[in-house]
């Protein structure tokens, strides 16, 4: 505060000696360039307001003395300043141009005259006799940095016109989190440079130019397509609010700027100026009806000067014993000049100074170094309703404070989307995007049909926009070249802003997400396998043996024989397999082995029939997939196809020798129409389809919320049913469901006839074996009884034919010697035992 107070006190050093009162008239000089008519007007009417307001300088009157200078004429400026200083002048205001301003300031410093400026000055030091009401450049630069960080800008281009302008953005250049490209505007045609920025895919631009160039740059940017919904501009000029942006109001471009003054609140001052000029039969030109920042600063500078004079005149610390105006060449700011005598006394106690002033530019105050570093800026955005709308503020102490809510932003985007025509890029893919059969006779959107076509129509009904479908020129969805890194297909069109939306069976991948934006998924799916259904063959008589090939049956029979023989041998070797046949005899003469060769065969059969087998699937891992990919990549001929349609056709013609990996939703569509195909297994992964938009598109959220609404109300399910089942589909599923509803298929004689053949054959063999055994038994009886074979055979046949009773008398054989034991046998075989009869 000390520098400011000193500046005001110095005014009195050359005009006051030994007196306690200010002179009746205090002359202040204003130096203006040829184009500073508005500043001269503000200077003149600010003096008039001070003189009319008797609460300030009640006993003195300010006299405005203006001088006009040619632009950048330093010699003329020096001569005119010297002419002004020949009369007693309290302070000098202006000029605005740098060269003349620096020259005037040097003269004022040499002559020790207060110099008050209201211009942009990049110098970071202040002279003892100079004060500047323009905001301090480092503080402005800090405001830019804070605002851009609040806007979440990380990469942008700075366009500037003069080298001095870079001082305002020095903080942006030093910020490590920013990726900044700096380009200078030269000449009058900026379109070549703007085209380079467009080709570089730069969407955020900081425009650091004078206010009279803002409209020209924006106009040329619009001409080369550098304005629209996907572009963002930040204007550094404090006179951003004076630029006519009506032409860009409905472009959708997000233009943000700042202001130190609000012109609408200054309208009463403009009316005062109009009235004042009419007193002199003058009419203000249209250019003078807008108060610029520098004009408002000039107005505040005069007010601040008058306030300082008034405060110091009422201070008890100023002891003025006499009034005497001396030539300005003898005036000094500090100390008492010897020629003034001992009667001059001025103490430097500034505690009674009243403090900052609230002017047109807000609170005017200075830091310890004499800079206006603390001030408040309004943040503005272009709006369709108000053109420029205040959305926040910045101050050195409070930083950035955004008052614009998310609902306001959402509402503005949705309003901008209404009645707008969006370019929708598509590619042909059944059933998502298809050409109508009579598309040659149709034009525009009428050529297309499909799931995605209906989906865009439903979203447009919710959001109120129009749309135009276009086929992507190269027919590709979008993939990045591994060598050049360039994208093709729909992704390329979106990145170049040749389309606003891209829709097809568009898989959301990490790589694509890095290049473009995606809406909420409208379909979830995964990769699965499409395969040709096995062809049914006419059943043969022995079709029940089909589970195994003849080789397998042979191997099974061989294994059966080997296991049985091995079991028999091992049983004879193992000691524990030999048991006592008569448990009552403790010391038997013979041991018996229960596992004979026949029993071994029977045991193996029993084990085979009574045991089952479980097949446990083996888990697949990433290395397995890698081996699959290696095998597929090295296969000849290649197993890959250019399109899904080619893959499906190859599956149909391969007769079960080819399977194709494809999205499950596309498989569902194909198996609904081609009954010879089927899906094998479940999903191998999980993925989603979404609507693609250009990077950082403002329409991503509205489109996503519309998709969510369609999902919640069941419209997406209805669309899928329409295009998967109702439109030329559903036949195969209908057949399958009919088969399921009728129960399991009946097995005819042709399927199981072989079982009966085997059964009949087995019965025949069993009967043949039984007959042979019967004949052999009859022969042995005839021999033992010394009877004829025919008699014994007839006796046995007659007993069998009776079919009654379950017992048969034992026929015993007499021993040939007394020592020979007697054998007995039963009716069902040669079951022999021992007898004690002699």
Image (cartoon, grey):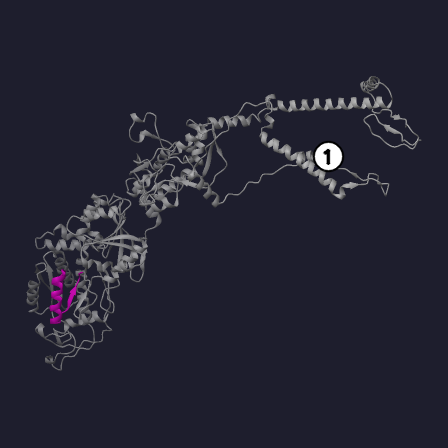
| Location of residue 328 in the rendering, given as x and y in whole percent from the top left corner | 9, 72
Q: Is residue 401 visible?
A: yes
| Location of residue 38 in the rendering, given as x and y in whole percent from the top left corner | 13, 56
Please count the marks in the image: 1
Q: Which residues are magenta?
A: 93-119
- Residue at point 54%, 28% (across, down): 740
| Location of residue 46 in the rendering, given as x and y in whole percent from the top left corner | 15, 61
Image side of residue 580 versus residue 450, left or right? right
Q: Report helix, strand or loop for mark 1.
A: helix
Above or below residue 427? Residue 57 is below
Q: What is the quadrant of the N terminus in the image?
A: bottom left
Q: Is residue 267 magenta?
A: no
Residue sitting nearer the eye, 821 or 85: 821
| Location of residue 215 in the rendering, given as x and y in whole percent from the top left corner | 19, 49
Classify residue 834 by image quadrant: top right
Q: What is the quadrant of the C terminus in the image?
A: top right
């Amino acid at each position: 505060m000390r520098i400011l107070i000193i500046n005001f006190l110095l005014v009195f050093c050359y005009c006051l000696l030994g007196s306690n009162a200010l002179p009746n008239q205090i002359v202040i000089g204003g130096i203006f360039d040829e184009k500073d008519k508005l500043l001269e007007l503000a200077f003149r009417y600010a003096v008039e307001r001070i003189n009319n307001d008797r609460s300030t300088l009640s006993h003195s009157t300010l006299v405005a003395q203006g001088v006009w200078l040619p632009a950048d004429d330093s010699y003329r400026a020096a001569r005119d300043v010297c002419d002004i200083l020949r009369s007693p002048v309290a302070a000098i205001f202006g000029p605005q141009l740098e060269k003349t301003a620096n020259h005037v300031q040097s003269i004022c410093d040499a002559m020790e005259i207060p110099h008050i400026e209201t211009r942009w000055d990049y110098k970071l030091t202040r002279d003892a006799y100079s004060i500047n009401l323009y905001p301090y450049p480092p503080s402005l630069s800090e405001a830019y940095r804070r605002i851009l960080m609040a806007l979440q800008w990380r990469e942008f281009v700075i366009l500037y016109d003069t080298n001095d302008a870079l001082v305002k953005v020095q903080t942006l250049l030093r910020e490590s989190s920013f990726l900044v490209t700096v380009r200078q505007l030269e000449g009058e045609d900026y379109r070549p440079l703007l085209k380079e920025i467009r080709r570089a895919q730069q969407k955020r631009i900081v425009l650091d130019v004078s206010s009279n160039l803002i409209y020209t740059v924006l106009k040329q940017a619009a001409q080369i397509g550098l304005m629209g919904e996907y572009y963002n501009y930040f204007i550094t000029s404090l006179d951003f609010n004076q630029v006519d942006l009506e032409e860009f109001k409905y472009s959708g471009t997000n233009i943000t700027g700042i202001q130190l003054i609000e012109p609408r609140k200054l309208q009463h001052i403009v009316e005062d100026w109009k009235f004042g000029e009419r007193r002199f039969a003058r009419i203000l030109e249209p250019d003078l009806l807008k108060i610029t920042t520098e004009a408002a600063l000039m107005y505040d500078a005069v007010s601040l000067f008058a306030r300082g004079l008034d405060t110091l005149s009422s201070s008890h610390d100023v002891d003025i014993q006499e009034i005497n105006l001396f030539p300005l060449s003898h005036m000094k700011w500090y100390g008492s000049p010897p020629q003034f005598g001992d009667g001059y006394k001025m103490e430097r106690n500034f505690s009674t100074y009243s403090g900052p002033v609230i002017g047109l530019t807000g609170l005017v105050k200075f830091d310890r170094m004499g800079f206006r570093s603390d001030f408040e800026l309004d943040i503005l955005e272009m709006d369709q309703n108000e053109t420029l709308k205040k959305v926040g503020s910045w101050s050195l102490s409070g930083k950035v404070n955004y008052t614009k809510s998310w609902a306001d932003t959402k509402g503005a985007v949705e309003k901008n989307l209404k009645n707008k025509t969006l370019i929708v890029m598509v590619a042909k893919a059944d059933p998502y995007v298809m050409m109508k059969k009579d598309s040659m006779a149709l034009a525009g959107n009428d050529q297309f049909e499909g799931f995605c076509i209906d989906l865009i129509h439903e979203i447009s009904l919710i959001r109120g926009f129009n749309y135009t479908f276009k086929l992507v020129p190269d027919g590709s969805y979008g993939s990045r070249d591994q060598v050049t890194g360039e994208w093709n297909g729909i992704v390329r069109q979106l990145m170049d802003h040749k389309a606003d939306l891209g829709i097809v069976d568009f898989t959301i991948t990490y790589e694509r997400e890095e290049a473009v934006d995606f809406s909420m998924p409208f379909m979830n799916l995964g990769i699965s396998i499409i395969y040709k259904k096995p062809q049914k063959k006419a059943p043969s008589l022995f079709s029940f043996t089909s589970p195994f090939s003849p080789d397998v049956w042979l191997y099974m029979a061989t294994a059966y024989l080997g296991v049985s023989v091995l079991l028999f041998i091992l049983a004879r070797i193992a000691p524990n397999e030999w048991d006592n046949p008569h448990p009552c005899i403790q010391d038997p003469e013979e041991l018996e082995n229960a596992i004979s060769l026949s029993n071994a065969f029977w045991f193996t059969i029993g084990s085979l029939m009574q045991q089952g087998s479980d097949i446990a699937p083996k888990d697949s891992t990433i290395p397995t997939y890698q081996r699959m990919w290696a095998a597929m990549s090295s296969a000849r001929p290649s197993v890959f196809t250019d399109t899904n349609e080619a893959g499906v056709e190859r599956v149909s013609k391969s007769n079960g020798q080819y399977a194709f990996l494809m999205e499950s939703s596309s498989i569902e569509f194909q198996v609904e129409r081609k009954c010879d195909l089927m899906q094998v297994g479940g999903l191998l992964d999980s993925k989603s389809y979404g609507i693609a938009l250009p990077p950082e598109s403002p329409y991503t959220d509205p489109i996503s919320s519309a998709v969510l609404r369609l999902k919640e109300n069941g419209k997406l399910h209805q669309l899928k049913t329409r295009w998967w089942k109702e439109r030329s589909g559903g036949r195969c599923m209908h057949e399958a469901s009919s088969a399921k509803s009728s129960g399991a298929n009946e097995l005819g004689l042709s399927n199981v006839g072989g079982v009966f053949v085997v059964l009949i054959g087995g019965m025949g063999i069993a009967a043949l074996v039984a007959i042979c055994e019967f004949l052999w038994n009859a022969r042995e009886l005839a021999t033992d009884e010394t009877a004829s074979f025919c008699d014994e055979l007839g006796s046995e046949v007659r007993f069998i034919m009776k079919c009654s009773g379950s017992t048969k008398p034992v026929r015993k054989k007499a021993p040939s010697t007394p020592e020979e034991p007697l054998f007995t046998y039963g009716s069902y075989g040669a079951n022999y035992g021992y007898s004690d009869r002699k």
